[in-house]
Image: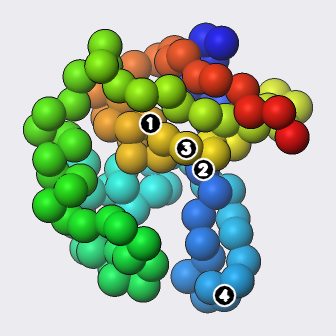
Amino acid sequence: MKININDIRIPLIAEWEPTSIICVKIEEMPHYKFLCGNEQPYVEYITRFPQGRSIEGFRSLIQDFDYAKMGDIICWEAGKTFLVYDGSHRICILFHKGFKEIDVVIKEK
């Protein structure tokens, strides 16, 4: 399904409460801030929640990024908004590259 990239929100663990999830716009993500040259929010994020993430891994994804070879981005549909289930790093890269619409797979609830 093709959707407007501005209709996407990404679940993010809240800084003030590690058991709370907030949904934010792409430009509020530490991943996107990293792409814009402000690496510190992403460094802090992966320090708090490493779960297989690394600066080197993200840099590699950015350097080797190919939209045609990219795996599925999976979202839940929530009214007129789409919540990311899998693909937050890739969505941030696409947004940074200026994509306006992207293809996603809708996950059933």
Q: Which residue is mark 3?
A: 86
In this picture, is 68 found above or below 40? above
Q: Quadrant of residue 47?
A: bottom left
- Mark closer to the chain start, 1 or 4: 4
Q: Which residue is mark 1?
A: 91
User: SS for tag 4?
Assistant: loop
Say left or right for 24 vs 52: right
Query: Which three-letter amino acid code belongs to the residue tagged 1?
Result: Ile
User: SS for tag 2?
Assistant: strand
Q: Are marks 4 and 3 in contact (CB under 8 Å)?
A: no
User: Would residue 30 be visible to someone looking at this image?
Assistant: yes
Residue at position x 14%, y 61% in the image: 56
- Rate crowding at label 1 as few (under 14), some (14 to 19) or many (20 or more) other CA atoms within 10 Å: many
Q: Which residue is mark 2?
A: 10
Q: Are marks 2 and 4 in contact (CB under 8 Å)?
A: no
Q: In the image, which is nearer the foreground, mark 1 or mark 3?
A: 3
Q: Nearer the viewer, residue 79 or 66?
A: 66
